[in-house]
Amino acid sequence: MLRINDDITLADQELSESFIRTSGPGGQNVNKVSSAVELRFEAARSPNLPPVVKARLRRIAGRRWTADGAIVIRAEETRSQVRNREIARKRLRKMIEKALITPKKRIRTQPTLASKRRRIESKVRRGQIKALRGRIRGE
């Protein structure tokens, strides 16, 4: 069971973990022990997440979101299987917490008259500088 906040708790049936051999350093141990964790969460079918949260979660997950609506998180930072499992679960929790926050609606504003004038003045100044760069004509 993975607790996200007071309202949302993911059941163990929604999460599936598979342990695979990790790449990188580790000597002979790397060929014998499956310490990397691949955590799979069926997000699209989860009854605990509202549709708006699922939509934001899909955008946040990016390429970790599969075609069938699952999030796949791979953790292979440490040589410990237990620690990698904790890391993967923590990543999933943070991803869901981020999706729970509704983004603020941007309010469009008009530029002030003073800022418009400053912009035009700077463009005129820049144009004058460029005009002075021309060929010097002698008398």
Image (tube, helix red, strand yellow):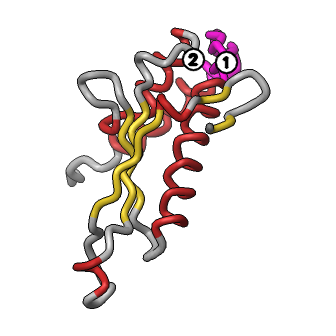
Q: Which residue is mark 2?
A: 49
Q: Earlier in the sequence, mark 1 or mark 2?
A: 2
Which residues, given as a range, are shown in magenta?
A: 101-117
Left or right: residue 132 compared with residue 23: right
**Which numbered disc covers residue 104?**
1
Residue 77 showing in the rendered view: yes
Where residue 99 appears, as percent x and y from the top left, is 58, 27
**Does 104 appear in magenta?**
yes
Left or right: residue 79 compared with residue 9: left
Q: Nearer the viewer, residue 57 or 49?
A: 49
Q: Nearer the viewer, residue 129 or 4?
A: 4
Tag 1, which secondary structure?
loop
Where residue 86 appears, as percent x and y from the top left, is 57, 57
Cα separation, mark 1 vs mark 2, equals 20 Å
Q: Quadrant location of residue 93? A: top right
Q: Which residue is drawn at the image coordinates 68% and 36% (left, top)?
A: 3
